[in-house]
Image: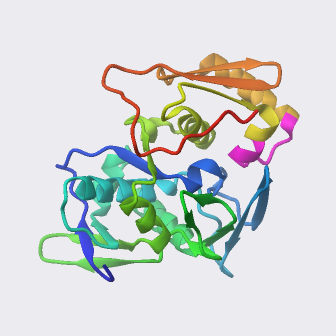
Amino acid sequence: MNNAVYQCDLTWPYKLKSDLFSLMLPVFALDGKATNDATIYYKGLYLEITTIKNSIGRATIKDKAILVFCLSQLMAKLNNSYETGNIAAFTAYDFLTTIGKGTTGKDYKDLEKSLQRLNNTRITTNLTVKGISLPTEARLITEYRYIKTSAANYIEVTLPEWLLECAHKGIVLDLHSTYFELSRPLHRRIYEICQQKCGGIYPKGKISVSNLHRLVGSGSSVAKFRCVIRELTQTWNLEHFNLTLNKSILHISKTLQKSEHPTANTVANKDQS
């Protein structure tokens, strides 16, 4: 599979996918200005996030859109028995329009910064998902480069081995088709936690605000975060999840749509309050 390229094709029917590691722990920063390394502890798990010297900062949850895009295309090809590789090739225009961004010069520059942050961010964790563990200082992407051809200009992103292993073993979780429409980083991360807790065989889940605060990776105090979550439960408009705050416990319930069925590509998760 080394240096084998697969083309991201928007004409393919595909579902948005995420790896389980970045759903279960706050791998990505909410704030695009986050530059400091971080260590998060949660119920016996730890996550260390480091960046290489002189980098422009940690990878953010908005940057994660690149991984979601590449992984989703890879899973579509694997599920249809097509040959794949470890390098995803796509045009910047296709990616930007897929995630609902513009195609101005600023949008292309922002994409370049996202690629840089992903390439410069390293994670170390003791979390193991169905026998898969991450190596020390695992990369979010191994490298990226720009390729010019007579047909188009492409970006080639080399995916790390741990992400490829998740894909080939089906250790991924579906994201709703409206995932990219969640413009606020906090809302996107809250949705991920909801999906991780209720995306499979469990239609309901709950989590304490203090634990949610850790899993979100919020830099605010728990008290301020509780106020934010209380407001969010009153304005949340993702119809397939209902959020209710009862004292310091956030209750999550999923409303299955007619087209939705529990998927095999999930890891069962018990409520963690």
Q: Nearer the viewer, residue 239 or 249?
A: 249
Q: Nearer the viewer, residue 266 or 46?
A: 266
Q: Quadrant of residue 168?
A: bottom left
- Say which quadrant the C terminus sits in: top right
Q: Nearer the viewer, residue 55 or 29?
A: 29
User: Is the residue 45 above or below the residue 54 in the image?
Assistant: above
Query: Horizontally, is 77 left or right of 260 in the view?
Result: left
Q: Quadrant of residue 258?
A: top left
Q: Does the rendering let one see residue 105?
A: no
Q: What color scheme is it?
A: rainbow
Query: Horizontally, is 243 left or right of 220 in the view?
Result: left
Q: Nearer the viewer, residue 262 or 226?
A: 262
User: Is the residue 195 above or below the residue 136 in the image?
Assistant: above
Residue 103 pos. (x, y %):
34, 53
Residue at point 48%, 35% (across, down): 200
Query: Horizontally, is 83 left or right of 121 in the view?
Result: left
Residue 60 pos. (x, y %):
59, 56
Residue 181 pos. (x, y %):
44, 36
Whether residue 20 appears in magenta in the rendering, the answer is no
Q: Does the rendering let one see residue 125?
A: yes
Residue at point 49%, 69% (across, down): 162
Residue at point 45%, 39% (across, down): 179
- Say which quadrant the N terminus sits in: bottom left
Whether residue 217 appears in magenta in the rendering, the answer is yes
Query: Horizontally, is 238 left or right of 70 in the view?
Result: right
Q: Quadrant of residue 87?
A: bottom left
User: Is the residue 67 above or below the residue 155 in the image?
Assistant: above
User: Is the residue 232 above or below the residue 26 in the image?
Assistant: above
Instruction: Please report the bounds of the magenta region as a residue range.
Output: 213-222
Residue 235 pos. (x, y %):
61, 19
